[in-house]
Amino acid sequence: MNVILTALILALFVFSSVIKAEETAGPFLIRRVIPDSAGKLLFVSGQKQRPGINYKTARLSEPERMVVDIENAVLQDENGKKSISLNNKNLAEDIRIAQFSTAPDMVRIVITAKTPDILDKIRITPCKSGVIFEFEKIELAERLNPSIYRDRNKKNTAPTQEITIEKSESDDKEAILRKIKEKIQNNIIIKTVKKYDNRIVLSGTGIISVSEPFVLDSPDRVIFDIADAVLDSSGLIGTFALKNGDNARIAQFDAKTARVVIESAAPQQYTHAVSPDLQSIVISPGSEISFAEFPDSNIKAEVQDIKVIKDSDAVTKLTVISKKPIIHGIERFYAPDKLRLNLYNLKAPSVETLRSLEKTPQFHGIEVENTAWSISLNRSTTVESKLSLDGRMLKLTLTDNLPIPIAGAGPVKAKVIIDPGHGGYDPGAESNGIYEKDIVLDVSKRVKKYLQEMGFYVIMTRETDRTVSLKDRVELANRENPDVFLSIHANASNNPDIKGIETHWYTTQSRPLAMHVQDRMVNMLVTPDRGLKNSRFYVIRNTEIPAVLAEIGYMTNQVEIYQLMTEERREATAKSIADGILSYLKSKNTNSEQDGRKQL
């Protein structure tokens, strides 16, 4: 061992024995990471005379590794990450150190060992000039890493923190981002956004987490939300012209979401891939996907193991373990319901291996074509994924939102027709270039998704921007004979001050349905309750089954039209309508009063 380094280490131990932990004014600046030549010590060195260096540890397996998070620390490295080669045959790979987050400042060190007992012997000693890594047993706490992918209806259970922006700063993007970073703990801070032909690459410090993308029309576009993320500066906000003529817009959507919007005539072609170090994401057309900027991008890895574990009747966990870090992306499809797991740098396992996997209520097998793994899903299954900190283990959690039983009638198997109003040559109400037909189609698709997850069979009178006559809508309803027909519209008035929601019914048999839907909307939406209306609209007057028309807000009110354009209002509206339909169908199978109010 180097004599000078040994003397330095011993001196640091002497000083550290008399230092008491206390709060410090600034972060611990890590300037050097020094391995000794014997491979027995690692010294993380920073500014001198610094008391109270705090850290947390965690243990992970497959492969065996230790994660050490140094709190209130900043890695003084141009790339914010580095690999340290330690001359120790017990370690499986280089030690990795990176700036894990900047709000709060935290540096993460990952040590991968060949066997668990090697990690048991590691001793960590903080001193006033840094942190020393030796060998001896330490107490380790379990630590969870966030989801890398989750379906849009998968709730984020992490507590959120309200952020208040002063009125004087409302137009100051830099001030807003600064407040977000100060007050909200994010998984990642996006530091760079780069364009390569038709690819957009976002990178930062922390862990990327992407929600299920969704497609909207007028204009046609696909939206990728990076959850628990904040842009590092307002300079990253803007529009990028792609080589194929499409446009990519980057923005801070809210305090917990960075948003990428691709405007394209074929938005469904866009997909994404996450880097194995969890700090970058590339978004591009699927046929042009490339990740040259990712670490280990040129390595073709083999699958080490695949595990299918049935946690319960409603939950299955699928784990893919690779010998090298995994570059992957996840795509969710509906009708038919399936998941495509793109494992871009993994060699396909043998057919025998795939056929031998145990089937569960949520997992029905895998079909592999090149790098695409297709997994059939139940209608009600939601998906969440996690990637281990070393990028080698990908775990998918498949959770069934099981159908809710109607009292005494077994699982819900009702048929519902959802009727998005207007469409095609009939735009409906209009406000500042925003059309009713587009708003109600988007909300209707969300209602369909919620109902399908509950186990309903759902028919849409239109699923694209096309013209459908009132007669055709009614004929479809009478031919299919569903349990429920619900038409969705947005309202308009000559009085711009009027806003709120209302539900219309015509026949007596339809009134209970209208009551359930209106009550659910009133409970979930912050807007005036304009009540139930007995009306003669064609689609509810000429249908032979319970049929109502829901007016979800006024486009002529400047506050409400803005709300109707937001993701939050549309999601809440869709959820409330779906809940109202479910509540109505449950009430039909009880001994309650005809209007079903006792069941609400």
Image: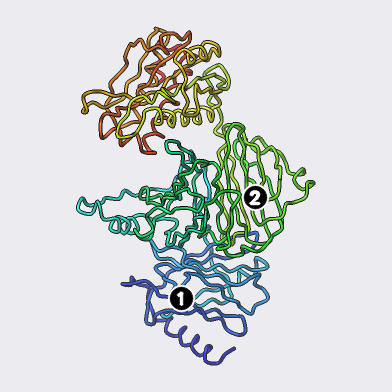
Q: Residue at x 49, y 24 (%)?
A: 462
The picture places residue 72, in percent across and down from the top left corner, at 39, 68
Task: Give the residue at the far bottom of this rendering.
Answer: 3
Q: Residue 303 bears which disc, if any?
A: none
408 on left or right of 229: right
Q: Residue at x 45, y 36 (%)?
A: 217
Q: Classify mark 1: residues with Cα within 10 Å, few (<14), some (14-19) or many (20+).
A: many
Secondary structure of the residue carrying tag 2 is strand
The picture places residue 267, in percent across and down from the top left corner, at 51, 42
293 on left or right of 118: left
- What residue is pinned by disc 2? 319
The answer to whether residue 240 is above or below residue 471 is below
Image quadrant where residue 22 sits: bottom left
Q: Residue at x 38, y 23 (%)?
A: 489
Disc 2 versus disc 1: distance between alpha carbons? 36 Å
Task: Give the residue at the far right of this rendering.
Answer: 352
Q: Please name which of the two marks, 2 or 1, marks the residue nearer to the observer.
A: 2
Amino acid type at circle 1 is: Pro
Front position in the image: 279 or 72: 279
**Quadrant in the picture for the N terminus:** bottom right
Numbered disc total:
2
Q: Earlier in the sequence, mark 2 or mark 1?
A: 1
The picture places residue 318, in percent across and down from the top left corner, at 64, 46
* Color theme of the render: rainbow
The answer to whether residue 227 is above or below residue 1 is above
Image quadrant where residue 456 sits: top right
Amino acid type at circle 2 is: Thr
- What residue is pinned by disc 1? 126
The answer to whether residue 304 is above or below residue 72 is above
The picture places residue 150, in percent across and down from the top left corner, at 52, 45
Q: Classify mark 2: residues with Cα within 10 Å, few (<14), some (14-19) or many (20+).
A: some
